[in-house]
Image (cartoon, rainbow, N blue to C red):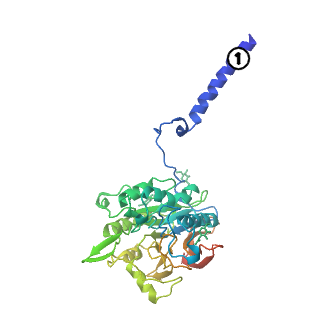
């Protein structure tokens, strides 16, 4: 009698376990026909400062990814051509992630090189894979080459916004009516909140503005590059005002777009840190971006790409204008001048009571893709006046 009950109990137990397993196993493993929708893996949001009060951004400018192992490097030393492919760019990105442990990666356009790929989706996966594998939040905007293969700019941004750990958006959500027609694809803002457990845990202490600077354009019969339009600046002013109005402490902001603004040319005559080795390939149109940024007051620095041989920072009108410096091996470069990446670190200061307050300082430096990932040209971009 007792044994019989034991057998029944045991069978019920086994059944229970099977039911439990069934509910715990992810759908992908049990449904063989691919009917289960693939859900995007999202990073933990909002972005936050670390416990040590820092937030590090890795800027990857002009990755120019093609088809991976079959896409050859450009402009390396004759001795370096053999065996040099897109995978060298991948390796550089992996090493940067390992060395710097960034909190966010910003791919600032020309992420893929349209004319060297048969399949934009495949190239996007190749380009961003190291960020996804590392499960790092990453943002991307478009350059002038991304749309040159099988996807339009709208399709690219939609696709990018759905990739694992991406924080990119096609365009701002919930635009008020008057703002609903905004030029371009990939205009969005990100907030970086205070460290977990700190009094400012629910406040944005650093704001990031990402803008689409377009691709090419013809103005007055002449070919030129795209520019940031008034609709985008209108949106930017509104977001900045809202964020500054709602913040308990002044929150500095950083802006990212691909094509530099015309004012960068003036830096030829000013003090810069880094190399100015080629003409600034900006638009012939000056749409007043710098004027807008200066009037908003919160943007302390702008980070662009596009000109691979320029990697300098210089200040105009209270805004630091920086280049990332060419990152990718399939983009043009200069043989013997290593590919490079820019880091941007924001650091919180402490208040009188010893808790983290607002941002106290923003620094930048670069690393070269040499054996030691040599760190160069460190610069304080901004310091809080208080
Ligand atoms: C590209 O990667 C290969 C394989 O790791 C390496 O031997 C070569 O030195 C790299 N080339 C450059 C220019 O970094
Ligand atoms: C962008 O800014 C708005 C304020 O205009 C804010 O409400 C929103 O949370 C920000 N977006 C992100 C993704 O942080
Ligand atoms: C932050 O927001 C969470 C969730 O709304 C709330 O529980 C918490 O008390 C807030 N913390 C502070 C310091 O404001």
Quarter of the displayed picture in which ligand 2 can be seen = bottom left
Which quarter of the figure has residue 232?
Answer: bottom left
The answer to whether residue 202 of the structure is visible from this angle is no
Which residue is located at x 59 percent, y 64 percent? 91
Residue density around tag 1, few if under 14, some if 14–19, many if 20 or more, within 10 Å: few
Position above or below: 240 against 316: above
- 48 displayed left or right of 124: right
Q: Which is nearer the eye, 375 or 243?
A: 375
For the view shown, which residue lies furthest in the right direction? 2
- 368 displayed left or right of 261: right
For the view shown, which residue lies furthest in the bottom direction? 269
- 235 displayed left or right of 139: left
For the view shown, which residue lies furthest in the top direction? 1
Which residue is located at x 47 percent, y 71 percent? 331
The answer to whether residue 224 of the structure is visible from this angle is yes
Q: Which is nearer the eye, 236 or 167?
A: 167
User: x, y (%) of residue 110?
Assistant: 44, 67
Name the residue that disc number 1 marks.
7
Q: Tally the marks.
A: 1
For the view shown, which residue lies furthest in the left direction? 220
Which element type, helix, strand or loop, lies under badge 1? helix
Q: Looking at the rendering, in which quadrant would you find the C terminus?
A: bottom right
Q: Looking at the rendering, in which quadrant would you find the N terminus?
A: top right
Which quarter of the figure has residue 226?
Answer: bottom left
User: x, y (%) of residue 50?
Assistant: 61, 62
């Amino acid at each position: 009698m007792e044994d019989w009950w034991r057998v029944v109990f045991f069978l019920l137990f086994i059944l229970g376990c099977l039911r439990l397993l069934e509910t715990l196993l992810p759908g992908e493993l049990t449904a063989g026909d691919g009917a289960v929708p693939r859900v995007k893996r999202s990073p933990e949001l909002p972005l936050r400062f670390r416990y040590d009060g820092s937030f590090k951004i890795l800027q990857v400018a002009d990755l120019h990814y093609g088809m991976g192992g079959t896409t050859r490097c450009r402009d390396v030393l004759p001795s370096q051509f053999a065996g040099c492919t897109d995978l060298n760019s991948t390796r550089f990105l992996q090493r940067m992630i390992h060395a710097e442990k960034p909190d966010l990666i910003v791919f600032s356009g020309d992420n893929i090189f349209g004319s060297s790929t048969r399949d934009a989706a495949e190239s996007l996966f190749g380009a961003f894979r190291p960020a996804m594998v590392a499960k790092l939040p990453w943002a991307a905007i478009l350059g002038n080459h991304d749309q040159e293969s099988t996807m339009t700019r709208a399709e690219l941004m939609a696709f990018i916004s759905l990739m694992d750990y991406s924080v990119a958006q096609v365009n701002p959500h919930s635009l008020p009516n008057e703002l609903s027609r905004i030029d371009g694809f990939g205009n969005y803002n990100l907030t970086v909140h205070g460290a977990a457990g700190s009094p400012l845990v629910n406040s944005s202490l650093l704001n990031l503005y990402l803008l689409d600077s377009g691709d090419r354009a013809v103005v007055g019969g002449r070919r030129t590059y795209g520019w940031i339009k008034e609709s985008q600046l209108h949106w930017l002013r509104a977001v900045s005002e809202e964020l500054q109005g709602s913040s308990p402490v002044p929150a500095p902001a950083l802006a990212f777009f691909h094509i530099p603004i015309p004012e960068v040319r003036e830096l030829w005559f000013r003090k810069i840190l880094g190399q100015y080795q080629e003409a600034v390939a900006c638009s012939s149109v000056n749409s007043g971006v710098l004027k807008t940024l200066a009037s908003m007051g919160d943007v302390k620095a702008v980070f662009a790409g596009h000109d691979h041989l320029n990697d300098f920072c210089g200040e105009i009108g209270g805004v630091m204008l920086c280049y990332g410096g060419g990152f990718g091996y399939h983009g043009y470069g200069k043989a013997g001048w290593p590919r490079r990446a820019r880091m941007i670190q924001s650091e919180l200061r402490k208040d009188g009571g010893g808790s983290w307050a607002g941002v106290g300082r923003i620094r930048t430096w670069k690393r070269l893709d040499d054996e030691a990932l040599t760190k160069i040209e460190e610069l304080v971009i901004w310091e809080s006046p208080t």
